[in-house]
Image (spheres, rainbow, N blue to C red):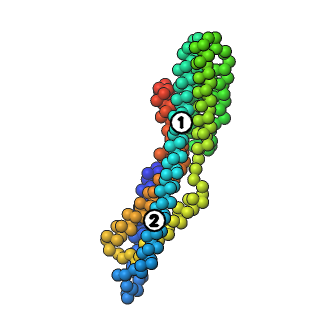
């Protein structure tokens, strides 16, 4: 089942539950029940609960979006740094340049073809990728620069490898869900309370009220799905992609 189908079913289910509860409550209500008026205190409490829950939802969405954006930036930094290593190797002799290019190509190919799937299944970065990056660092450092131009390029290459290594470790730290379980507990309880307060307002079975109640519950379901999807930057539908590597290393697309 795709995530979008799961979202559609969840939103439809939320609407059906709310409508079903309203219909059952209306059928079992006392004939002399007065639904024309609602105590002011209930309206005030309902409003405050809605406002507080909206703030919590907004903070949760902002938090998971920031984590996803940071993960995407790490991937861009890693890819750009490795591209700079290959570019700066152009000032060195052909044999040394071929070794560096081979190491860079092997690493980025492994990241795109193997490690991305490994992160989703194992929940972390692969030690094989760490070894490939270590081999690149060793091969780059194996030849001392012979002139000023090589010295400048050599130092820049070592710096870029260090940046790529840092971005890689940061990428590994962003694998898996980032939101604590207690926050999810609060979001779930808040959704139940917020929707439940509609019944405290003595909602009736008119078409307008049923549509509004169903739409409101579906909106909350969509927002919770959005938070859940963004919560794992590398493992779900709208996850961080390998596009920075594919753009900078066109041979990967083949």
Mark toward the viewer: 1 or 2? 2
Q: Is residue 11 above or below residue 3?
A: below
Please state the horizontal and vertical placement of residue 154, each as a whole percent of the image: 61, 19
Inspect this view and state whether residue 44 appears.
yes
Q: Secondary structure at mark 1?
A: helix
Residue neighbourhood size for the residue with mark 2, other residues' Cα within 10 Å, grouped as few (<14), some (14–19), many (≥20): few
- Left or right, 29 with respect to 135, comes to left
* Residue 10 shows in this picture: no
In percent of width and height, residue 151 lies at: 62, 16
Q: Nearer the viewer, residue 139 or 131?
A: 139
Q: Which of the labelled discs sits on residue 75, or is there none?
A: 1
Looking at this rendering, what residue extends furthest in the bottom direction? 32
Residue 134: quarter of image: top right
Considering only vertical position in the picture, is 103 above or below 113?
above
Residue in the image at 66% along x and 30% along y: 131
* Residue 29 image point, x, y percent: 41, 83
Q: Which residue is mark 2?
A: 51
Residue drawn at the location 56% of the way across and 59% of the way down: 184
Q: Position of residue 74 (x, y in %)?
A: 55, 37
């Amino acid at each position: 089942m795709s995530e979008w189908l799961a979202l559609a079913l969840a939103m439809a289910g939320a609407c059906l539950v709310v409508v079903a509860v309203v219909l059952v409550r209306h059928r079992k209500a006392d004939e002399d029940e007065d639904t024309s008026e609602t105590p002011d205190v209930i309206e005030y409490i309902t409003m405050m609960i809605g406002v507080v829950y909206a703030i919590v939802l907004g903070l949760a969405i902002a938090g998971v979006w920031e984590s996803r954006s940071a993960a995407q930036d790490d991937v861009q930094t890693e890819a750009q740094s490795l591209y700079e290593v290959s570019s700066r190797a152009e000032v060195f002799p052909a044999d040394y340049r071929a070794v560096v290019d081979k190491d860079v190509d092997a690493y980025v190919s492994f990241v795109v073809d193997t490690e991305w799937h490994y992160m989703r299944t194992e929940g972390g970065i692969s030690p094989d990728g760490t070894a490939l990056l270590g081999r690149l660092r060793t091969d780059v450092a194996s030849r001392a620069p012979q002139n000023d131009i090589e010295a400048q390029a050599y130092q820049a290459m070592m710096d870029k490898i260090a940046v790529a290594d840092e971005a890689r470790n940061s990428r590994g730290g962003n694998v898996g869900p980032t939101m604590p379980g207690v926050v999810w507990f609060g979001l779930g309880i808040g959704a139940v309370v917020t929707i439940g307060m509609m019944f405290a307002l003595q909602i009736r079975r008119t078409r307008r009220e049923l549509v509004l109640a169903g739409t409101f519950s579906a909106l909350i379901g969509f927002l919770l799905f959005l938070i859940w999807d963004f919560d794992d930057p590398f493992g779900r539908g709208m996850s961080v992609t390998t596009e920075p590597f594919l753009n900078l290393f066109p041979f990967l697309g083949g």
